[in-house]
């Protein structure tokens, strides 16, 4: 086929004409800004894009043919041990399929998350794995480019996309029930300022366990999801007139800082303050004492995330929930030898929720 015989590439102007809008409006939809577009207009533009087969750039057209063999990964903060290990597991799972991974941190970017997504698309990825900081991420740019997106670290489904997450509520209920089983009746919570539904689900599960036991909820201290945040939360928790005898800390990263604050106060863990955390990162194994924690099965979830990128059927575009089993060490008060236990305990299950 000669150059003259090749079909003319679909342009933004063609899409605008089909949708009955200006080319600027098409740009706003594809780029997810900088101006907002009415939902009805956005749907009309997206429909025109799909009908015409428009792709924002040559790289995206090559992507559609599956030639880049690269996937994008966006997490909030790679310095968080949970996301660091999750990212490593995704890279391993991708390598098994002959794929490379490029990643970026959305929380550290000056631009909004939607801009980070668009820049990743422009780099020519075949698919995108996203740990969004938003409960309702803006994914129009990916849809317009025909890029599949799998959302990770989710508590609930996102319509039209595959998503993956632990059963945060159930795991938190188990965590607090474990502390109740040690005879604690005043259990405090350390949680974040934000975090969307993944945070609220953890809080809800913990409260549910307390109320089922017929007890009043203990104090709740909010802090940044970081080691510094956990340390600050520990100081504030210990200054309460009636401090709890046990605390459920909703991330390993916070728990490490919390343990430091308790040690500095001269209290014994778990004798005077029992602790259970959430995530099951390797760092939790090497804290002192080693943390009893709810283990998110990052390797299993990573393999599922990479596998779902290649699936486009309706059955795959749902929320996939993994069990987060209790990993018992000694910070909760269980009489275990103070030696490193095996991290790989419990068999996570994958359930598709419509």
Image (spheres, rainbow, N blue to C red):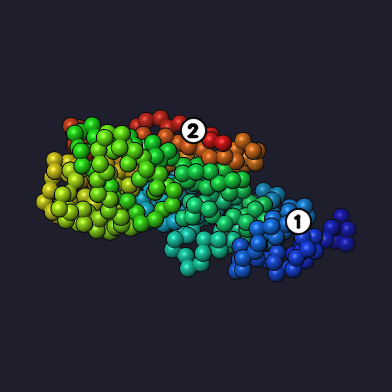
Relative horizontal placement of residue 119, taking residue 5 as reference (left or right): left
* Residue at screen point 20% across, 42% down: 186
Residue 133 on image: x %, y %: 46, 55
At 73% from the left and 68% from the top, the residue drawn is 23
Q: Tell which of 132 and 105 is nearer to you.
A: 132
Q: Quadrant of residue 245?
A: top left
Q: Is residue 116 above or below residue 148?
A: below
Name the residue rendered at 35%, 45% in the picture: 203
Q: Secondary structure at mark 1?
A: helix
Is residue 179 shown left or right of residue 102?
left
> Relative to 183, is 30 above or below?
below
Q: Is 294 on the left-hand or right-hand side of 263? A: right
Secondary structure at badge 2 equals: strand
Question: On residue 137, which mark appears?
Answer: none
Q: Residue at x 39, y 56 (%)?
A: 194
* Whole-percent x, y for residue 99 in the image: 57, 47
Q: Quadrant of residue 324?
A: top left
Q: Nearer the viewer, residue 291 or 170?
A: 170
Out of 247 and 107, give the one closest to the viewer: 247
Q: Which residue is mark 1?
A: 48
Does residue 90 lie above or below 183 as drawn? below
| Mark-to-mark CA distance, 1 and 2 | 36 Å
Q: Is residue 34 left or right of residue 5?
A: left
Residue bearing mark 2? 350
Q: Earlier in the sequence, mark 1 or mark 2?
A: 1
Q: Residues within 10 Å of mark 1 (few under 14, many from 20)?
A: many
Give the quadrant of the N terminus: bottom right
Whether residue 64 appears in this view of the structure is yes
Dots 1 and 2: beta carbons under 8 Å? no
Image location of residue 271, percent across then percent down: 13, 40
């Amino acid at each position: 086929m000669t150059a003259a015989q090749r079909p003319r590439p679909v342009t933004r102007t063609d899409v605008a004409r089909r949708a009955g809008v200006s080319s600027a409006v098409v740009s706003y939809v594809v780029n997810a800004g900088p101006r907002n577009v009415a939902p009805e207009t956005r749907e009309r533009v997206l429909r025109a894009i799909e009908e015409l087969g428009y792709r924002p750039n040559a790289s995206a057209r090559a992507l559609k043919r599956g030639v880049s063999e690269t996937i994008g990964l966006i997490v909030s903060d790679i310095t968080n041990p949970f996301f660091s290990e999750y990212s490593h597991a995704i890279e391993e799972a991708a390598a098994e399929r002959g794929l490379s991974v490029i990643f970026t941190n959305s929380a550290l970017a000056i631009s909004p998350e939607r801009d980070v997504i668009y820049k990743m698309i422009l780099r020519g990825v075949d698919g995108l794995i996203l740990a969004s900081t938003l409960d309702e991420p803006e994914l129009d740019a990916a849809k317009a480019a025909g890029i599949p997106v799998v959302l990770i670290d989710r508590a609930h489904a996102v319509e039209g996309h595959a998503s993956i997450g632990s059963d945060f509520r159930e795991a938190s209920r188990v965590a607090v029930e474990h502390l109740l089983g040690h005879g604690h009746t005043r259990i405090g919570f350390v949680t974040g300022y934000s975090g969307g539904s993944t945070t609220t689900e953890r809080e809800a599960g913990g409260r549910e366990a307390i109320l089922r036991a017929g007890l009043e909820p203990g104090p709740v201290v909010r802090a940044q999801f970081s080691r510094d945040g956990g340390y600050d939360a520990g100081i504030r928790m210990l200054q309460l007139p009636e401090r709890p005898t046990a605390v459920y800390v909703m991330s390993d990263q916070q728990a490490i800082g919390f343990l430091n604050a308790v040690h500095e106060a001269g209290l014994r863990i778990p004798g005077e303050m029992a602790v259970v955390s959430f995530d099951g990162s390797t760092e939790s194994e090497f804290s002192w004492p080693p943390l009893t924690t709810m283990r998110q099965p990052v390797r299993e979830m990573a393999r599922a995330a990479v596998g779902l990128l290649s699936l486009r059927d309706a059955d795959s575009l749902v929320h996939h929930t993994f069990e987060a089993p209790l990993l018992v060490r000694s910070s909760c008060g269980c009489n275990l030898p103070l030696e490193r236990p095996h991290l790989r305990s419990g068999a996570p299950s994958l359930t598709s929720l419509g």
